[in-house]
Amino acid sequence: MGRQAVTISFRLGGEDGVSVEARKWHWALRELGFATRRVAGSIEDGGQPDDVVLPTLAIDATDRPDERAISAAIEAADLVVVDNICSLPLNRDAAQAVARAAARHRGRVVLRHHDLPWQRRNLKHLEADFPPRIEGALHATVNLRSRRELQARRYENVTTIHNYFDLAPPAGDRAATRKAFGFTDDDLVMFQPARAIERKNVPGGLRFAQRLHHLAPDRAIQYWLSGPAEDGYAPTLERLLDRSPVAVTMGRADHAGDAYAAADLVVFPSTWEGFGNPIIEATAFRRPCAAYPYPVLAEILASGVRVFSTEHPEQLVRFLGEPAEVCNRYFDANVRRAELSFALADLPVAIEEAFAAHGWLAW
């Protein structure tokens, strides 16, 4: 039997950032010769025969987790990827139980961090035990900022493996998706691909939409938020939608490609992101993207990838008025820049090099 890798998290198989990136890691690990399995509190894509669902690991679980069940689920793994469940105290009991099971595990352990508690205003006071310090484990952050912050707190064995993307994805169905969501051919569809939670800054996105409408009053703007509301944000979102100066539509398309195809532009007003996948996704799907300057955005811009700013809507209005050939040159150049740093085909090598630098040369 070949090498086996197990990913364990709060939830897997969905469209949240951790699930999306876990799928890419599974592909990359299979390219490196691993068989892969999933262990999570919930698995949202219907599941696979070898999945292990432990409901007490879910973010909102109230029962205490069974550490023996966790240990049994990862026991046969040569590699355990602890994906964000031990990074944030969203379910403290679950995170600590997974940490103890990972510390006892005889195989190799990667703690993958998309976010860290001191980076979240509502979790900063809970950072003392997070992430856990497991002897011999490799901490893999998705951005350089988190790596430096862990090292400043004297964590050992820290590397950065940022997120990677298919930069030549199949085109989505623009006409059918716009029809399904009730958008007309003349609507200017502004897409925010995000769950509705505080740091996604829906108010900022709506303000940007209103400013854009003032600059281009001849276009009917449709603000499309993929949603849903989470972390108790639903009442706030309801108030925002009631008072919104632009029309708002909520809901997910069947496929990400369909959503980007149906959109005319992407807005990304988040105040904090561990990485910011929609920046590169918009690049891959050749859509202009306006982003708020959240801290980690600077790392993406350092690669040469370009975005518009939510603080300067006039620049985006000018771009939308450019001839098609000018826009296509912009998109072509942006894809070329992204390919140098974020091409999915490079992920297996990035993982392999990180393992080798950690001394994991033989299995």
Image (cartoon, rainbow, N blue to C red):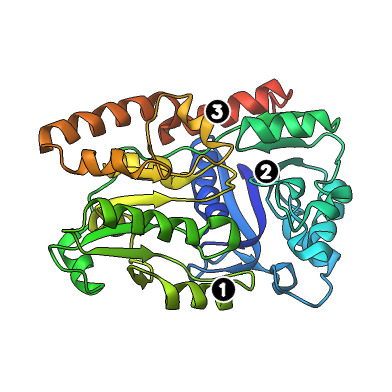
Q: Is residue 270 above or below residue 229?
A: above
Residue ID for mark 1: 236
Q: CA distance from mark 1 to mark 2?
A: 31 Å
Kindly identify the residue that appears in the image at 23 percent across and 66 percent down.
177
Position of 32 with respect to 67 (left or right) is left
Of circles 1 and 2, which is in front? 1
| SS label for mark 1 | helix
Of circles 2 and 3, which is in front? 2
Residue ID for mark 3: 350
Q: Earlier in the sequence, mark 1 or mark 2?
A: 2
Tell whether label 1 touches label 3 (CB within 8 Å).
no
Quadrant where the N terminus lies?
Answer: top right
Q: Which amino acid does the dot numbered 1 rest on?
A: Thr
Q: CA distance from mark 3 to mark 1?
A: 41 Å
Kindly identify the residue that appears in the image at 80 percent across and 46 percent down.
131
Q: Which mark is residue 142?
A: none
Q: Which residue is the extreme one toward the front? A: 214
